[in-house]
Amino acid sequence: MLAADVVVGWVTAGLAYGLWPDADALDDDVLTAVLEAAHDQCVAYLDESDVDTDPDPVPSRWQLAQVSQARAVWRAMRSTRDNQAGAEALGVTVFPMDWTVQQLLVPKRRKPTFA
């Protein structure tokens, strides 16, 4: 288990374990790789010309997005080519980046309407 203060991307291992309880079952190298991949994907999704991808402090919604994306990456890695996982071959939906992660990174603003 990674030390709680180890930083991977925008999150500490402690935060990752808190948000993703099953993460403690992963090997340290695997968890680090999945969190790094998720961070890279989140940064790639952001438009770097409009957003500082290394802010201080990092928005908590970006940290949630990174952990959520890491969970999705891990789930995708464990699924079969038919998007099934587990002993009973349960169906799972595998997306490159879930819309909730996208919304955490770049929330869509409600456009004003005129009646």
Image: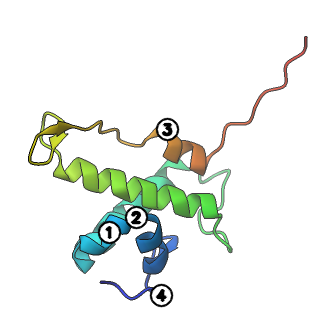
Quadrant position of residue 37 = bottom left
Tell me the amino acid under the disc marked 1: Ala
Expressed as whole percent of the image width and height from the top left, the position of residue 30 reads 24, 71
Quarter-wise, where is residue 27 in the image?
A: bottom left
Callouts 4 and 3 close, C-beta under 8 Å: no
**For the residue carrying disc 4, how many other residues have a C-alpha within 10 Å: few (<14), some (14-19), or many (20+)?**
few
| Residue 20 tag number | 2
Q: Secondary structure at mark 3?
A: helix
Q: Which mark is residue 99?
A: 3
Looking at the rendered image, the disc whose residue lies closer to the viewer, 3 or 1, is 1
The reply, left or right, for residue 110 in relation to residue 23 is right
Label 4 element class: loop
Q: Earlier in the sequence, mark 3 or mark 2?
A: 2
| Residue at x 85%, y 19% (from the top left corner) | 113
| Residue 23 numbered tag | 1
Q: Where does the image place residue 92, in percent across and percent down from the top left?
A: 25, 38
Tell me what residue is drawn at x 41 percent, y 73 percent.
Answer: 17
Which residue lies under the disc numbered 4?
Answer: 5
Q: CA distance from mark 4 to mark 1?
A: 15 Å
Q: Earlier in the sequence, mark 4 or mark 1?
A: 4
